[in-house]
């Protein structure tokens, strides 16, 4: 079963770039949603949070939302969804 992974962030954000590199090195399929380049992606990210702020980087794995997770935390959730 394929994971539905989304990475919300921006190209200029070093943390976003870190997660892109991490996911690529793991060979995982994911969608990168640049919240500065696309207002729909920004609205989608805002809808994940009660405060409606652009809290990036955020990674979603299915229904699970991770705000700026550590690699250990991210690894744990990737394992749980296998």
Image (tube, rainbow, N blue to C red):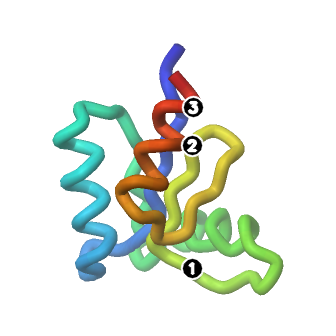
Q: Do the residues labelled 2 and 3 touch (CB within 8 Å)?
A: no
Q: Is residue 14 above or below residue 41?
A: below
Q: Indicate the quadrant where residue 63 lies.
A: top right
Q: In this view, does 75 lie above or below 55?
A: above
**Which of the two residues, 23 or 47, is positioned nearer the viewer here?**
23
Instruction: Determine if residue 38 is in view.
Output: no
Distance from disc 2 to disc 1, alpha carbons, whole Å, reads 16 Å
Q: Residue at x 45, y 51 (%)?
A: 74
The residue tagged with tag 3: helix, strand or loop?
A: helix
Q: Residue at x 49, y 43 (%)?
A: 76
Q: Residue at x 30, y 74 (%)?
A: 15
Which is more N-terminal, label 1 or label 3? 1
The residue tagged with tag 2: helix, strand or loop?
A: strand
Instruction: Determine if residue 24 is in view.
Output: yes
Q: Residue at x 57, y 43 (%)?
A: 61
Looking at the image, which residue sits at the far top? 1
Q: Indicate the quadrant where residue 80 lies.
A: top right
Q: In this view, does 60 lie above or below 25?
A: below
Foreground mark, 2 or 3? 3
Mark 1, residue position: 55
**Which of the two residues, 22 or 76, is positioned nearer the viewer here?**
76
Looking at the image, which residue sits at the far right? 50
Mark 3, residue position: 80
Which is more N-terminal, label 3 or label 2? 2
Label disc, if present, on residue 61 of the rendered structure: 2
Q: Residue 14, percent across and down?
A: 24, 78
Question: Crowding at label 3, few (<14), some or many (≥20) Cα neighbours within 10 Å?
Answer: few
């Amino acid at each position: 079963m394929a994971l539905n992974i989304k990475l919300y962030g921006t190209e200029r954000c070093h943390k976003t770039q870190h997660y892109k590199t991490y996911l690529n090195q793991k060979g995982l399929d994911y969608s990168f949603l640049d919240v500065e380049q696309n207002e729909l992606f920004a609205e989608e990210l805002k809808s994940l949070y009660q405060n409606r702020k652009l809290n990036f980087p955020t990674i979603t794995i299915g229904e699970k939302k991770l705000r700026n997770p550590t690699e250990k935390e991210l690894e744990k959730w990737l394992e749980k969804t296998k």
